[in-house]
Amino acid sequence: VLCPSSPSNVTVDAVSCDAWVSIGSPSISEECTTVIYSITHNSIYAIDSSDASGDYPIGPHQVTWYISDNSGNVDSCVLSFEVFDLPPALTVPADIVVNADFNQPFASGVPVPVPYFEDNCDSTLTWVMWGVTNDTLGDTLEPDIYVVHSPDTFNIGVTYIEYTFTDGHGNTLVDTFTITVTGPPDIECPPDTTVYLDGNEGQCAASFDPGTAELIEGIPTITWTYTITYPDGSTVTDRYDRTDPIQPIPLGVKDFPLGVTTIEWHAQNVSGEDTCSHWIEVIDTIPPTFTVDPYENCVDPLHWAIYDEANPNPVWNHVDPLVKKYPVDFHTLPAGDNSLDLTSLEDNCCDSLSMVDSIHWRIEFGDTFDPLTGAIINNGTLSGTGQPSTYGSDILLPGDGVYFGDIVHHIYYWVADCNGNRTEEVMREITINPRPQIIKQDY
């Protein structure tokens, strides 16, 4: 028996679950003319008993030919081949992004395209949904469930839809797409900021970039509005739309006056709106400045002088030189005399006139000597606020009428500006020169 070769493997076409397979028949070599032969096969898909060709379903196959004679001799041939299935095809829709309904946590009426799926036979399409929308499962056992319903409602956030397409021969395709519902804007403002004047500004303001609000979530178009409210109550407002880029326009460096400035940001799109605010506080930490020069003067002039052993210190402005007065050597600053006033008071924020009442001064008088005993006399201190010229009484600066030397007094100043910044104490020397020494001559 001459057996034919096994047929080649075949693949079904796009609309069939089987394929035509041509199968050759065996032949008999050295046939005996006196013998009766019978040739049969076991295929259930054949055209007839003498031809094994036919439409064979998907899968592996074996066809056996049997050759028998009338003497009971049997021989056989086994042919093997396979019919292959076409792989299924599945393409899901592109990812979908939609806006939520205005001021709602969902988007309604969202159209969901059906996937493209194709197979020649015995296939099943199922889907599963998860994420922010309730999990849902469908299959082809019921009409209109093997694809996601459309239109439908989806919550804010991301919903995942996964399709699984399986044919009857174990071939499976899985693909996923998303439906993203973006809600109203979610914005975040820069942190509150405190800026300290450092003296480099040259004015009572700080140059500072306050930053801008940041869009955390939300879909274009975003309408941005900002309002700057300055410490004096004045405001600046601007409003504009942003699509690409979606973030607000930077404010850049601006001058912020002393005090608290508030910036309020507002963002709105078709789904809703959000607001945030932050403040910039500018604080003055720079104290006033002033300079002082030493002051020097003499004791008051003596118009007449008398000598009294019991009271040898002369006095001045005698109306009657024979009238004895208490001994005195002073330089007198009459009330209103501005010799000790501050004239160079300046501040970066405050007007000099506004700081006059915040001038604090203190005179520590130098020691003088008792004219009778020569003992040291502590003359104490004198203090006041405002300019010394406004003290309201004469300021008497003691001189030396005993040893006729210079007496040095010290006046200390400190000033607070209108923002409470206080200077260090600054000392100014006051030197009082003595009167001429009068020496009695005996003749």
Image (cartoon, rainbow, N blue to C red):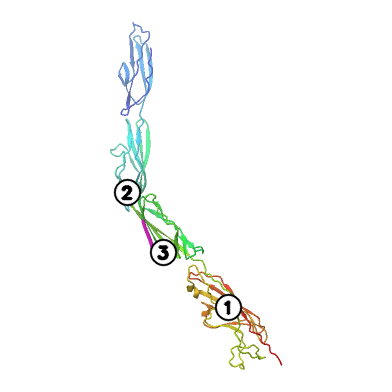
- Side (left or right) of 337 relative to 114: right
Give left or right: position of 196 versus 131.
right
In the image, residue 418 above or below residue 272: below
> Mark 2 sits on what residue?
107
Residue 200 percent across, percent down from the top left: 51, 63
Cα–Cα gap, marks 3 and 1: 43 Å
Going from the N terminus, do you reach mark 2 or mark 3 first? 2
Q: Earlier in the sequence, mark 3 or mark 1?
A: 3
Badge 1 element: strand
Is label 2 or label 3 in front? 3
Q: Position of residue 306 (x, y in %)?
A: 64, 91
Quarter occupied by residue 413: bottom right
Q: What stretch is highlighted in magenta?
A: 232-239
The residue tagged 1 is: 363
Q: Which of 159 and 190 is in front in this view?
A: 190
Residue placed under numbered mark 3 in the picture: 230
- Front residue of 230/126: it is 230
Q: Considering the numbered disc 2 on the image, is that residue within a helix, a strand or a loop?
A: strand
Disc 1 crowd, CA 10 A, few/some/many (<14, 14-19, 20+): many
Residue 180 coordinates in the image, percent (x, y): 36, 46
- Which SS does the magenta portion mostly show? strand
Of residues 179 and 377, the one drawn nearer to the viewer in this rendering: 377
